[in-house]
Amino acid sequence: MNDETSREPARDPQDLERLLIARQWVGDVDGMAALFEPDAVVDGGEGQLTRGRQAIRALFAEITATGRKFASGDRRPAVINGDLALTSTKLPDGTITTEVARRQSDETWLWVIDRFSVA
């Protein structure tokens, strides 16, 4: 699954979380990072911001190496305004994630901002 051409793109902002989890479960760290714009930012909490796709890839490689698996949760319907979308998920442990996605020129979606936990 490391061949980028074989990766399913996110045709809807709601697809991004599902794709992220599926790719993590099979160890496709490059595929996880490919769901983010090149200059995206991830807020991992406690003031730790990870900027840029390469740094996000390194973060996901570190998380995946620990054996920790992302869990699927209760996804809320995306709020879409033009080419931007706000997505959020309530995870089984009660935490809530929020993300901002942007529609790309090919009509696919990539995350621009990802906050692991807001509650």
Image (cartoon, rainbow, N blue to C red):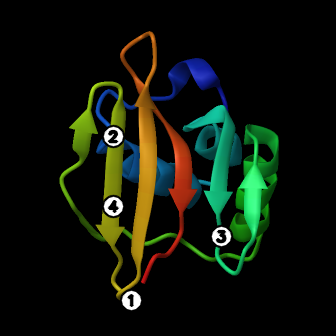
Dot placed on the residue nearer the N-terminal end, 2 or 3: 3
Q: As shown in the figure, which amino acid type bears the numbered disc 2?
A: Ala
Which quadrant holds the N terminus?
Answer: top right
Look at the numbered discs 1 and 4 and tell me whether their residues touch, using CB distance below 8 Å: no
Mark positioned earlier in the residue sequence (4 or 3): 3
Say few, some or many: other residues with alpha carbon within 10 Å of mark 4 (under 14 / 14 to 19 / 20 or more): many
**Mark 4 → mark 3, Cα distance in angstroms:** 15 Å
Q: Nearer the viewer, mark 2 or mark 1?
A: 2
Name the spot of residue 61 as percent of width and height, x first: 76, 58
Considering only vertical position in the picture, is 77 above or below 90?
above
Query: Which disc, if any, is residue 46?
Result: none
Amino acid type, callout 3 = Gly
Residue 81 in the image: above or below residue 70: above
Neighbourhood count class around disc 2 (C-alpha, 10 Å): few under 14, some 14–19, many 20 upward:
many
**Which image quarter holds the C terminus?**
bottom left
Q: Residues within 10 Å of mark 3 (few under 14, many from 20)?
A: some
CB under 8 Å between callouts 2 and 4? Answer: no
Mark 4 is on which residue type?
Answer: Ser
Q: What residue is shown with label 4? A: 88
Circle nearer the viewer, 1 or 4 = 4
Q: Where is residue 10? Give x, y as percent.
A: 38, 32
Q: Relative to 22, is 1 above or below?
A: above
Residue marked by disc 1: 93
Which residue reaches farthest left? 77
Q: Position of residue 101 (x, y in %)?
A: 43, 39
- Residue under the image location 41 percent in, 44 percent down: 16
Q: Which mark, by number, is residue 44?
A: 3
- The answer for how far apart the CA atoms under marks 2 and 1 are is 24 Å
User: Of the numbered discs in the image, which one, if any, rests on residue 85?
Assistant: 2
Mark 3 or mark 1, which is nearer to you? 3
Distance between the Cα atoms at labels 2 and 4?
A: 10 Å
